[in-house]
Image: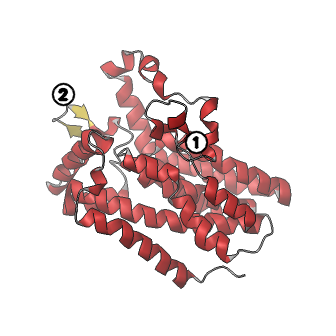
Amino acid sequence: MLCPEPRAYALLTGLVGLALAIPLAFGDAAFAGAGTDALSLVLPHYAFQAQALRSGQWPLWNPYLLTGHPELAGAQWGVAYPPQVLLLPWVGAGWYIKVSLVAHAVVAMWTARWLVRSWLAAVGVPASALAVGWVAPAIALSGFWAAHTRAGHIQFAQALPWFIGVAAAGLDACRGRPRAGVALAGCLGLAVVAGGPQLAPFGLAGAAMPWTIALLTSRRWRALWPLGAGLGLGLGLAAVQVLPSLELTAESARARLPMATFAQGYQWQWQYLPSLAVPDWPRSVGARDPWEFDTWIGAPLVALALA
């Protein structure tokens, strides 16, 4: 069975976007869970950025946090993320978060569609209605997306569709499409600048697995050139955010604190690995803040195998 036409998939993504938008438009569902990062961390930064941009200033120095804070020091605040820069001064912090959650969920559905089609083409399987029409939305709206949205990690929701795009563009490059390296660079740069450098190791490791299979299957070793060039250019674009953040945080008092002690409860452990196939597994094994480790994508993977 052939894959759905783009118009049918557009209708599907529109319906999903509408289902997400209605509770956000008529309530504060974006801030579900008192004390989540959306309220305690993301909203204050976005409010400051909106105020600065409305006054015609680049949000470089935030005077409202402690005794002052360089905004670029936080690699998760999306200071240079184009949609954020363009929308924040017009819609404000609260509405931007709501619009961003819906818009990036829809974009993730499209990049997931791209990923599924590229993967099936790489392994020589015709794209089916089940794979494209059901698996792609399931990947985009998986347990990872739901858990981090619930936790208020808005920046992760913004970065997710672009990391999916990184995997898809890399697969196209592995199939001998040199221009895919440009798409790979753009997606990687946007993923990091959107506030997702914390996801980069996981996103790139996850993308490398299908890339390796595609290269071993096709034996198009020349594809390593556009793949490597795309990764290099993407990291260069990401440096707009990463380099100032590294430089500024190295000068802060926080740099002299034993951060490993504070991060101990958030370290990955092998006992969390079944979360790939079992929903809410980290909670069952007593993980601290279990949504930090929820990577459930079991259902879409099973469906993709059946497709």
Marks counted in the figure total 2
Using residue 271 as the reference point, say whether residue 107 is left or right of it.
left
Residue at (69, 63) in percent of width and height: 304
Q: SS of the residue at dot 1?
A: helix
Q: SS of the residue at dot 2?
A: loop
Camera-side residue: 287 or 242? Answer: 287
The coloring applied to the image is secondary structure
User: Compared to 110, does 139 lie above or below?
Assistant: above
The mark lying in front, picked from 2 and 1, is 1
Q: Residue furthest front?
A: 284
The residue indicated by pointer 2 is: 66
Image coordinates for residue 108, horizontal then vertical, percent:
50, 62
Image coordinates for residue 191, horizontal then vertical, percent:
48, 51
Q: Quadrant of the N terminus?
A: bottom right
The residue indicated by pointer 1 is: 202
Is residue 294 at least partly visible in the picture? yes
Using residue 47 as the reference point, say whether residue 171 is left or right of it.
right
Going by the numbered disc 1, the residue's amino acid type is Phe
Residue at (74, 59) in percent of width and height: 174
Is residue 219 at least partly visible in the picture? no
Using residue 258 as the reference point, say whether residue 252 is left or right of it.
left
Image coordinates for residue 223, horizontal then vertical, percent:
76, 57
Q: Quadrant of the C terminus?
A: bottom right
